[in-house]
């Protein structure tokens, strides 16, 4: 499969490496290094913002109570296999 949980990390790493190679080939100037650093910071920030985190299932109450109340409910089932 082409896209999986590591695709973003690989693609952002390739984009940063490509920009760094371009900056070195054209001559290391401060504004080009700032562009590489900004892309790296932006990729890291996006990864941090969109990484899912585990939540306590009992914190929001039982799902059965929300299902009958007319509130949209998302049930996610996961398996490590």
Image (spheres, rainbow, N blue to C red):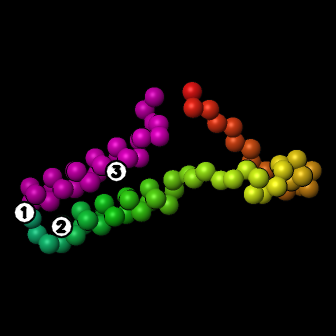
Q: Disc 3 marks which residue?
A: 12
Frontmost residue, 56 versus 68: 56
Determine which quarter of the picture holds residue 22: bottom left
**Which element carries disc 1, helix, strand or loop?**
loop
What is the x, y in percent for residue 13?
30, 49
| Secondary structure beneath label 3 | helix
* Label 2: how many Cα within 10 Å (few below 14, some 14–19, many 20+): some
Q: CA distance from mark 3 to mark 1?
A: 22 Å
**Residue 32 shows which numbered tag?**
2
In the foreground, 65 or 22: 65
Q: Tell which circle, 3 or 2, labels the residue nearer the N-terminal end.
A: 3
Q: Report the residue marked by disc 1.
A: 27
- Comparing 29 with 66, the one in front is 66
Magenta span: 1-26
Residue 25 among magenta residues: yes
Do tag 1 and tag 2 residues touch (Cβ < 8 Å)?
yes
């Amino acid at each position: 499969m082409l896209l999986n949980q590591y695709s973003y990390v690989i693609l952002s790493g390739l984009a940063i490496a490509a920009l760094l190679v371009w900056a070195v080939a054209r001559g290391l100037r401060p504004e080009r290094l700032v562009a590489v650093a900004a892309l790296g910071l932006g990729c890291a920030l996006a990864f941090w913002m969109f990484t899912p985190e585990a939540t306590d299932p009992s914190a929001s109450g039982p799902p059965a109570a929300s299902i009958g109340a007319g509130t949209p409910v998302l049930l996610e089932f996961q398996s490590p296999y």
